[in-house]
Amino acid sequence: MLSNTHFSMAIHVLTALAYGDGELVGSDKLAKSVGTNPSFLRGLIGRLKEAGLVETQMGKGGGTRLARKASKITLRDVYQAMESKPGLKTHLCCDVSKCPVQAGMNTLLTDICGRVEAAVQTELSRTTVKDLLSAYIEP
């Protein structure tokens, strides 16, 4: 449903930070865990920081840590930080056609996509980063 891997990478980063339990983690170490470029990851971390999910410290010994408890960060928070547009995109029909299907298609697709987006956000709000750590990561 999502058009890129930013959401899943952000979940990986936040879960790794929760596993670190408040320890500052450098972007090199996080990038190695995620399997991506540290420079790219710093951009993703910047978006998480703007959303208030992480805090960063520059310089030697610096890094990133959660800005609030893992139990207070939902997957919806992460989704909203990473996605600037809804996960589903609609094809917009031109208004020139006299086709009866075309006449209602924009409204139909907009309605369906809106309901799917609302369902996604509701489902993501049910799970926290702490839930992921507890259920899927061994201590």
Image (tube, rainbow, N blue to C red):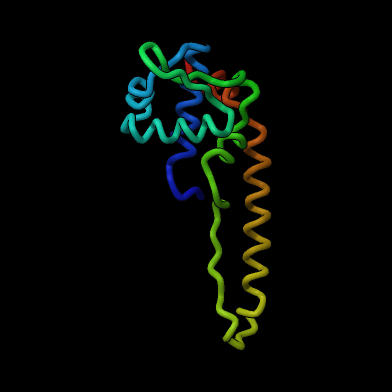
Task: Look at 53% across and 68% down and name the residue there.
Answer: 91
User: Residue 117 placed where, x, y %?
Assistant: 63, 50
User: Residue 56 placed where, x, y %?
Assistant: 48, 21
User: Residue 76 placed where, x, y %?
Assistant: 62, 37
Task: Look at 46% across and 50% down and name the residue there.
Answer: 3
Q: Is residue 100 above or below residue 62?
A: below
110, 61: nearer the viewer: 61
Number of numbered discs overlaid on the protein picture: 0
Residue occupying the far front of the picture: 59
Q: Is residue 42 above or below residue 19?
A: below
Is residue 139 visible in the rendered structure shown here? Answer: no
Is residue 42 visible in the rendered structure shown here? Answer: yes
Q: Is residue 123 above or below residue 69?
A: below
* Residue 113 placement: quadrant: bottom right
Task: Look at 67% across and 48% down and name the residue there.
Answer: 118
92, 55: nearer the viewer: 55
User: Residue 111 placed where, x, y %?
Assistant: 68, 62
Task: Look at 49% across and 48% down and name the residue there.
Answer: 2
* Residue 98 placement: quadrant: bottom right
79, 133: nearer the viewer: 79
Residue occupying the far bottom of the picture: 98
